[in-house]
Image: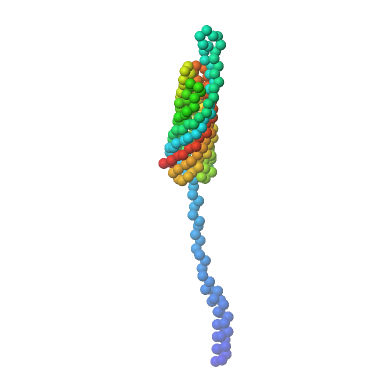
Amino acid sequence: MKASVFVAAIVSITAAPALAGNLTPPADPYVPPPPVPVSDWAGPYVGVQLGFGDFDLDATLPPPAGANIPQVINLGDDGFLGGVHAGYNWDRGTLVYGVEGDIDFTDISFNTVDVDSISRLRLRVGLDTGSAFVYGTGGAAYMSGGGGAISIDSWGWVAGAGVDFKLSEKWVAGADALYHEFDDVSPSGSVDGMTYRLRVSYRF
């Protein structure tokens, strides 16, 4: 009888650590991290812009009465400009491209020759870096204005670069720098120059 009790005690002592090992709580279940938000620039937008322009006018006028030498005019001016824009983007992952139209009204003038407005229709192509869209742009431009014997109503081209930053999924702030050239100024001349603008857009 004593031998049986002794054996039972030995068995219980040796089994206790094994039973204790089985009481370890199970590991927490694996919870995958939330997906990283994907930046999307696709869709229509509208906005306003405000900036600064610096332009030069080169023109040749017919000689005045009684003279044989044409009048050569070389004038420059800078001033503020502002207007509205609208466009549409397509997003292909890293690549973003779109089309945009805009118009700026200016206070730039070459003595009596006023630059009333500059309109543009441009392509934009660039990279989606997450919260920013960095792009190059180019297209057609139209300048309206004139004074005296000179009309600067003329088609030309525009090219430049810019960047847009997402303030939220709806609001975007940006900036661009654009070079313009208009070669059909009447009676014979051209206008060229740069604009530098800050922009705010609303995405639909």
Q: Residue furthest bottom?
A: 1
The quarter of the image holding the C terminus is top left
**Residue shown at 45% from the left, 45% from the top:** 169
Looking at the picture, the colour scheme in use is rainbow
Can residue 125 be seen by looking at this rendering?
no
Q: Residue 94 in the image: x percent, y percent?
A: 53, 42
Q: Residue 135 in the image: x percent, y percent?
A: 53, 37
> Eyeballing the image, is 190 above or below 174?
above
**Residue shown at 57% from the left, 88% from the top:** 6
Q: Residue furthest front?
A: 111
Q: Residue 119 in the image: x percent, y percent?
A: 46, 29
The quarter of the image holding the N terminus is bottom right
Can residue 150 be seen by looking at this rendering?
yes
**Residue shown at 52% from the left, 13% from the top:** 62
> Eyeballing the image, is 162 above or below 57?
below
**Residue 120 or 191: which is nearer the viewer?**
191
**Residue 188 or 40: which is nearer the viewer?**
188
**Residue shown at 54% from the left, 43% from the top:** 129
> Eyeballing the image, is 93 above or below 183?
below
